[in-house]
Amino acid sequence: MVDKVLTANRLADGISVWLDASGNWVESLQDAFVARHAEAVAALEATGKRAFDENKVVDVNVVDVEEVDGTLRPLRMRERIRAEGPTIPYAPGYHGLAGPKNFAA
Amino acid sequence: MYRYDEFDHAFVSARVEQFRDQVQRRLSGELAEDAFKPLRLMNGVYLQLHAYMLRVAVPYGTLSSRQLRMLAHIARKYDRGYGHFTTRQNIQYNWPRLSDTPDILQELASVEMHALQTSGNCIRNVTADHFAGAAADEVADPRPYAEILRQWSSVHPEFSYLPRKFKIAVTGAERDRAAIQVHDIGLHLKKDENGKLGFAVYVGGGQGRTPLIAKKIRDFLPEEDLLSYTTAIVRVYNLYGRRDNKYKARIKILVHETGAEEMARQVEAEFANLKDTELKLPDTDIQAIAAYFAPPALTNRPEGWGNLAGWKKADPAFAAWVHQNVQPHKHPDYGMVTISLKPIGGIPGDASHEQMDAVADIAEEYAFDEIRVSHEQNLILPHVALADLEPVYRALVAAGLATANAGLITDIIACPGLDYCALANARSIPVAQEISSRFGDPERQAEIGELKIKISGCINACGHHHVGHIGLLGVEKKGEELYQITLGGSGDENTSIGEIIGRGFAPEKVTDAVETIVDTYLGLRRDKSETFLEAYRRVGPQPFKDALYGGNAQAAA
């Protein structure tokens, strides 16, 4: 079976998030809980549906990943870019998903 | 430019408060996503790959300095310090928080801007020639009519739930800079033999998965009939458009399936009932709106001619910029300046908050406080005295905005692609950057001459690839990006849809393929005056296929 993780976008700010082993939505794919068998995938799906119904996240999806040298890597490019951010330097001080939180207000 | 009246202010403010309430109810859980999604889309808020995206309307691409400063402020305060100007003359922010969007809309309303109808199956932002009101070749400024259409179409009760989105473009010149033939309705403002203003009306153009060139269904529609005739078109579409299939729901499919002649007959029949109703535009109303768009008081500045010659002689880089980015104005002492948002190797259409502030300052000091957004993702200063070109250029250089490439191979249109967009299948921006870097040498660009490359990251064609002289369409094949190349497209008065040249190219090969196409053109053109498009139309695709595939294009496609 292909390994899977649960991903979504946070309701209030839309930022991409992944579900970790403690049931928290975290901003790094590398901290995600990996489902390696059918029961775990079913649990992920149920958790995703509950989080959507509770208005914590939107656009909830289970996505395929592989582990390469200890790093999680989604199989689809779309999901790789979602996990790592734009593949281009797009603004001073920002790369990928990271960047200063309170940029020169 | 147009100024909001009391009604406009009250209407936009009421919409902001309504949306604030909707967002609060969504965040508190009172509203579910299914109920909220159409509401946020009606206010320009999308969800993309990494975050929400807010698309702000720039009606017919016209901005004042005050408005552009507000766009810079929003980029700084609520986003990541930049914005992206789009092929529909709008601006998009890629990282706003949903919880901030009511405040952003409130700030926009304070400068008479909004995000209404930048999404959804309604009549979208009406676009216009970015040189409107300044171009030497126009019969009249098309923007008053675009503004009339904006007012008429804003939350129009009959047309808020059309089968699909609906885009109108207006030009006032023979040379079409608004791509009207690839819009749902394209309006060409012209004069009849008596000097009376009216429109040639085109219907059913569009790009996307089924690119079609619009059909002319009226050669001359008197200006007073603009709203009644447009209503007739949209009403016929609303009645008969294919609501059963999203991919066949645009008016272009209806026109294609019905036939232009029958479509025209149905529109004329509807129009006959509407012609003498309250939709008829009184001349006083047209004049009242037109007065908002009165050209600035352009005093004679003949000293500019002598100054310009001296400055050009002293600074070849300035001369190159004037040659490429300044077009003749209807007043001989003035020019229309294109501010390229296509730095070599940069992201097409992106501008930082500092750059937006800089352009606002320059426009205020030297350009009568007016800025335009072009559908080619550049900014325009429509009225600059030749005598002021040198200080304008210096200020643009300081802001990193003086790339002399308007209309050249590095003036690339690109959609956000898979770096941001939830619909995309492939990236557009890195491809644009690599092509731009490959051809960035000014002498090489000048040698190649006019050549428009347009890149879309999916079949929806936001990057206008169908009308690129060279069009690139990113697709996903077996999990990898692949770029299909089309040649010979054009979005002007001689609109054509590009032809697929053969099998696609992997990301690392696509720039080489473009270079092969360009070198083939350089080798076969009659002389330097024959542009890429002219040469392609003369020789057809075969020499390019041979160069790219060695005669094996069909077998391998």
Image (cartoon, coloured by chain):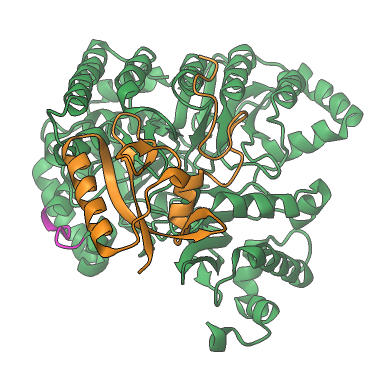
Chain colours: A orange, B green
Could you say which is closer to the camera, residue A57 or residue B222? A57
Res. B421 in view: yes
Q: Is most of the magenta stretch helix, strand or loop? A: loop
- Which residue lies most toward the left here? B273
Is B447 above or below relative to A24? below
Could you say which is closer to the camera, residue B96 or residue A55? A55
At horizontal 68% and vertical 30% (from top left) the residue drawn is B401
Residue B419 location in percent, x, y?
Answer: 50, 47
Q: Specify start and end residues of the magenta stretch as a single range.
A: B239-245
Say if the magenta span includes residue B240: yes
Q: Is residue B163 left or right of residue A15?
A: left
Residue A16 location in percent, x, y?
Answer: 39, 40
Could you say which is closer to the camera, residue B94 or residue B381? B94
| Corner quadrant of residue B300 | top right
Residue B484 location in percent, x, y?
Answer: 53, 68
Residue B115 location in percent, x, y?
Answer: 32, 29
| Corner quadrant of residue B229 | top left
At horizontal 50% and vertical 35% (from top left) the residue drawn is B84
Res. B457 in view: no
| Corner quadrant of residue B167 | top left
